[in-house]
Image (cartoon, rainbow, N blue to C red):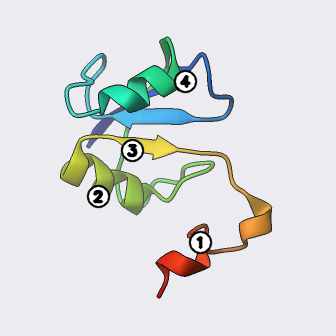
Amino acid sequence: MNCAIYKGSRKEDHYLYVEREDDFEHVPEDLLKMLGELSLVITLELSEGRKLAQADVNKVMQSLREQGYYLQVPPRPELGDNPLPERLLR
């Protein structure tokens, strides 16, 4: 699976993954506004065995297939292994 990764000008350490360069058709307008001006960081070929520095490649590929994009946000250590608020887990 092909993948293009972009960095926004407004949110440090947030990366937007899409399948094709400059194809933001499936990315919500609010998300694009939040990220600001996008600049291409790298294009990759994703596969099940590939390692990514800050994201699970299987989750990235699933998100690309299901919603057309994946947003990588910086880890929040205070949330531990589960970044979802407790109220959403019930």
Between the C-alphas of marks 2 and 1, the distance is 22 Å
Looking at the rendered image, the disc whose residue lies closer to the viewer, 4 or 1, is 1
Q: Residue at x 23, y 48 (%)?
A: 67
- What amino acid type should be assigned to the residue bearing mark 2? Gln
Residue 76 quadrant: bottom right
**Amino acid at the residue labelled 3:** Tyr
Disc ID at residue 41: none
Residue receiving disc 1: 85
Residue found 29% across the figure and 32% down from its top: 27
Give the residue at mark 3: 70
Element class at badge 4: strand
Among numbered discs 2 and 1, the one appearing first in the sequence: 2
Q: Identify whether 10 is placed above or below 57.
A: above
User: Where's residue 89, x and y in %?
Assistant: 49, 82
Which residue extends farthest right?
78
Give, as a three-letter code, the residue at label 1.
Pro
Give the structural element (helix, strand or loop) at label 2.
helix
Looking at the image, is mark 3 or mark 1 nearer the viewer?
1
Residue under numbered circle 2: 62
Q: Residue 59 or 35: which is nearer the viewer? A: 35
Q: Residue at x 38, y 61 (%)?
A: 58
